Amino acid sequence: MLTFCGYEFRPREAFDRARKERYTNFLPAPSSEKITEMGRKVSSWKIPRHTTLTLEDIARRANPVLRGWFAYFTVFYPSRVIPLCRRIDRILMRWARKKYKRLKRSNRRAKNWLRRVRDSAPRLFAHWLLRY
């Protein structure tokens, strides 16, 4: 295993579409440490505390960083950043629960709210384009 520029090179399972068979190849993917570091960086923005901001304001602040990360780290193995996308969604749900009284006591309502927002504006956050 080799880590270089945030990528971890190690044997991974791959699929040959022409021959329709699986094989092992030495493929790069974002390292676990880098994914964790990006998640901590997003958490350090303390989004749930900014209840005076709108969702568009949060997206305007976060998207340049998220686009940069995803442009760099999704070239080879895009599914590796899905845990980071989930973490960002959980942070947005926490923000919604603090901002809107009707969502305060229910994770399920906050999740449904976020799903409706995502369906109505799928290009609002950079990770929504990648994941959904």
Image (spheres, grey):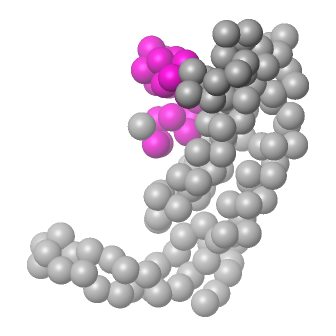
Say which quadrant the N terminus sits in: bottom right
Residue at left offset 56%, top offset 27%: 108
Residue under the image location 81 percent in, 52 percent down: 40
**Residue 10 appears in the rendering:** yes
Q: Position of residue 3 (x, y in %)?
A: 67, 81
**Relative to residue 107, is residue 24 drawn left or right?**
left
x 68%, y 60%: residue: 35
Q: For the stretch drawn in magenta, what is the main secondary structure?
A: helix
Residue 47 image offset from top left, x and y in percent: 81, 30
Q: In front: 56, or 92?
A: 92
Q: In the rendered image, which quarter is residue 90 located in?
A: top right
Left-right relation of 51 to 87: right
Classify 66 as above or below 51: below
Quarter placement of the C terminus: top left
Whether residue 120 appears in magenta in the rendering, the answer is: yes
Image location of residue 16, percent across then percent down: 22, 76
Please provide percent x and percent y for residue 87. 66, 45
75 over 126 or under it: above or below:
below
Visible in this render: residue 60?
Answer: no
Please give the count of numbered marks on the rendered protein: 0
Query: Would residue 104 be found to the left or right of residue 115 on screen?
Result: right
Q: Nearer the viewer, residue 104 or 64?
A: 104
At x 54%, y 70%, the residue is 29
Res. 97 image quadrant = top right
> Against 47, is 66 above or below?
below
Q: Which residues are magenta?
A: 111-131
